[in-house]
Amino acid sequence: MNLNLFAMLGWPEIIGILIIVLILFGAKRVPELMRGLGSGIKEFKKASREVQDELQRAIDEEPPADSTRRGPTAPPSEHASTESTVASEAEPTSKA
């Protein structure tokens, strides 16, 4: 459902909101607030556009070819397992 705030509000409500903002913040602060709001919206649009572009690049990217896929890892070699067995069979030193 698309809710447009200004479509729900009539002109008297919008003018009332503007008068309240003017009273609360003063005439000198309102342009500064609007500039900050505008730059915030611009940054948000820029960031969302970058995210959409990144997602589109990821979708358009081709999957890797079958030749580059790696299979399951090979079991450890005989030499590595023998070294660990020899090290575990060593007698501990006794303290006397």
Image: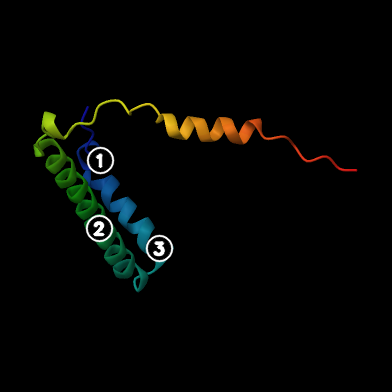
What amino acid is labelled 2 in the image? Glu
| Residue nearest the viewer, comparing 83 with 24 | 83
Residue 6 pos. (x, y %): 22, 42
Pointer 1 local density, CA inside 10 Å: few below 14, some 14–19, many at least 20: few
Residue 43 image label: 2
Q: Is residue 16 above or below residue 38?
A: above
Instruction: Give the SS element for disc 3.
Output: helix
Residue 52 pos. (x, y %): 17, 43
Q: Give the residue displayed 50% in from the left and 31% down from the top.
A: 82
Instruction: Give the SS element for disc 2.
Output: helix
Q: Name, please, the residue furthest toward the bottom.
A: 28
Contact, mark 3 vs mark 2 (Cβ under 8 Å): no
> Label 3 belongs to which residue?
23
Q: Give the residue displayed 24% in from the left and 36% down from the top.
A: 8
What amino acid is labelled 1 in the image? Leu
Q: Mark 3 or mark 2, which has the lower sequence index? A: 3
Q: Mark 1 or mark 3, which has the lower sequence index? A: 1
Which quadrant does the N terminus fall into? top left
Residues at marks 2 and 1, CA–CA distance in whole angstroms:
21 Å
What amino acid is labelled 3 in the image? Ile
Residue 95 pos. (x, y %): 86, 43
